[in-house]
Image (cartoon, rainbow, N blue to C red):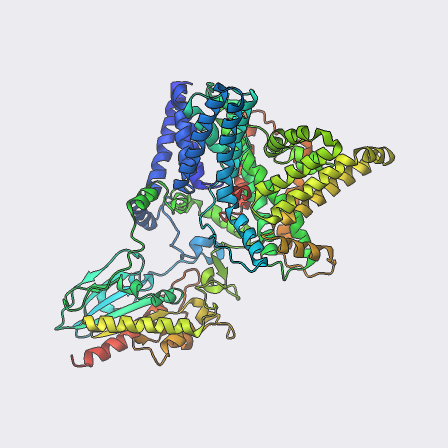
Amino acid sequence: MVFNSLPFLVFFIVITSLYYIIPSKFRWQLLLIASCYFYMAFVPKYILILGFTIAIDYAAGLLIEKATGPKRRFYLIISLCSNIGILAFFKYFNFINFNITEIFQQFNYRNPIPYLKFLLPIGLSFHTFQAMSYTLEVYRGNQKAEKHFGIYALYVMFYPQLVAGPIERPQNLLHQFREEHFFNTEEVKAGLLQMAQGLFKKVVIADRISILVDHAYADYKTQSGLSLGIAALFYAFQIYCDFSGYSDMAIGAARVMGFKLMTNFNAPFQSKNITEFWRRWHISLSTWFNDYLFAPLVLAKRDWGKYGVVFALMITFLISGLWHGAGWNFIIFGGLHGLAISYEFLTKKFRKKMLKATPQLLYNNLSVVLTFLFACFSWVFFRSVSTAQAFEIISKIFHLSLSDHLNLKLNGIEIGFSLLLIALLLLKEKILPVIQVRGNFAYFTLMFLILFSCYLFGVFNNKQFIYFQF
Amino acid sequence: MKSIYKLSLALVALLFIMIYCISSSEPLMKVIAQYRYQLKSPFGSDKYTYGDLYGLTYLPQFKMKQSPNGDIGAIKSNRDINLYAVVDSHIFSFVKSDSVFYGVKKYWFGTWNDYAKHEYITINNKQKNILMLEIVEHNVRLMADTNYVYNKLTAVNKPQIAKPQFNNGNASSYADRIKNAFFDKKINENLEFTLFGYNFLAPLKELKASINYNLFNRIDKDVMLSTNKQYLYLKSTADTAYESSYYPTPQYKINNIVTSLNHVYDHYKAIGFDEVYFIMIPNPTTILEPRKDRYNYLIPRIQYSPDLKMKYIDLYDVYKKTTLQVYKKSDTHYTNAGYKLLIQELNKKLKAEQETQK
């Protein structure tokens, strides 16, 4: 049940209406049942996997809190291993098996292990990380173990953020399930407006651009360097509008019911360097990796000095790349960002000197452009189905000529329209990050215009959100 | 929260729960759809009024009033033939009366639509019994599976002929039925029909279609425009898809279909049918845009195969030669002219059958 579908519209209306009708003490049950139904709409039997991890982590949380000494670590390891084990099995088994096959072939052996043939449980990477965040925070003493199984289950399964985040922390979310949320007209209006904006980004911008990008990548062998270069640039906006659009809808849906989820994007294309980029892009994931992987690694390798930091950065981003997908192209994607951030870390002083020597306006704008181009470059690996495809596309792009034949699937008007939408989006983020609407007339007019535009200009080709595949 | 607001929310929730439940129920949706297709009011549905392809695209230039299907006269003849047919909408939505068939006293038909539904009939061996299998070109490849055909029709009055073993692979388990009750596969489509499939919303849909076509040169993903922009085609028959008129079909696949048709022919002849006729309705693209170097010649390669035992009605040749408009411009079906040509060719065969001594 994707957010930009009619079943979700009906589901949301029903659940939100019932939420405000039933007594506060029963609301967590309603949300839990709704979240189960929402998850089962994808592949029903996979709820058993989710149930299993919830049970393990719920028990682990209680045991960690109760235990002392090495036993605490033991229970934490059980919880982490079960989560990572399930993630590894469903997401990485075939990738690992494929690499074993490649190695065996070098020695003329046949790999006897068969490949697994089933769908990846939706949202696995997201809810696994959210669950691990819980046991880690209980272990660190930052969060009390949740004694109520239903409330804990809801923490993992809360439907607005179940399948593609934001990846929440228990300190932010758990207590909200116990609080009474009164109907707050302003919050409901703000939540609905945020959902409408997210829908606009998804169906008007992202799904429109995807026509051009999908065509270019599907037919990359016959596409010119210029076409592929344009597709690479457009993909940046496709993935941004797709994912931030989803996040807006998730955050908005929660807000309508009085829940506050964390911000996941903060105008990432205004970043002047990759370090800043990851503070603005998929914030819930980057902070998760920072808190639970990078910081502990830096601490563990503090004797290595700055090389310890570089080591921690590379490991963090390689794993982050792998989190996105089971493939070498994703690992390269992560590795590129690790290298970029390591470079920025090691050259901080030098770049500060450069800043003083260069006109600030030029430096800032050049930095924004270079950061954007680097992100586009890394996304070629992200979007490609294999490293071979990615390298071939990059090679073609670097050999492009302005006289190359264009084969872009979208006509000139639609490309122009897409560019206009992108320009408006970037302008809106710079000038008016949060739209404040005063008065009901203005509000309803704005909502009508956004929703009518979604209908009139939306591309409804049943395209799933990009991050659902992770 | 004030009681009045809670009551309003409760009514809203109830309304949408009802909408969701109705949209999840295939039998209910069928009844509602049939009712709404006939309704002329703003709350009716015009999905098929101007052609099924118009109902997908809503391009205003293809909003063409459709003449009633099957508007051809009755034929006078002695009637002593029992005609059994397994057909699709090209026949069942056009044949209004048995009297269009030459010499036919009794007409029974089943459809290909529901794979799991078996049709059982009893044949009177003292009378002339003809079986007609009609299928549109883009579904012809299904004929390579003999069970696909056997599952449609079984004659039960010949005890020495064993009933064929049906492939019940598609029969639903209880788990599947429960799953379908809660998570209907067609829920999106059904909700779209329930919430937005109204005549009064057609101008909006046409506006969107016009913007997409005139500005962005795009139409519905399931439809294509003909080269001369006069016709709408189902995209799967006109692009590189498996069902397309241009999908390369190696000879062994043709041979498989012919072999299967021969098994079907032998089976039904043994059961008691005096003759079995096969009709392939050409895709519009086959006749209107054959792209001589690209049409896969599926129909002629099957029909003219020297190994084919089954008798056939050669609609391909008739349509190629006629100057009449045999296809609708905004619908996947043929016109009444196309239908009349089919009936004329079929009646020639039925007349010949009647003249043959039993």
The residue that appears at 33% across and 77% down in the rendered structure is B308
Determine whether A137 is above or below A112 in the image.
Answer: above
Question: Where residue B307 appears, x then y in whole percent?
Answer: 34, 79
Determine whether B123 is above or below A178 in the image.
Answer: below
Q: Which residue is nearer to you in this view: A38 or A123? A: A123
Q: Which residue is nearer to you in this view: A325 or A42? A: A325
The residue that appears at 58% across and 58% down in the rendered structure is A107
The residue that appears at 27% across and 69% down in the rendered structure is B132
Determine whether A195 is above or below B134 in the image.
Answer: above
Q: Which residue is nearer to you in this view: A351 or B354? A: A351
Question: Where residue A99 appears, x then y in whole percent?
Answer: 56, 51
On the question of residue A212 being in view, the answer is yes
Question: Where residue A147 appears, x then y in whole percent?
Answer: 44, 20
Quarter of the image with the N terminus of chain A is: top left
Q: In which quarter of the image is residue B183?
A: top left
Question: Where residue A243 appears, x then y in whole percent?
Answer: 57, 39
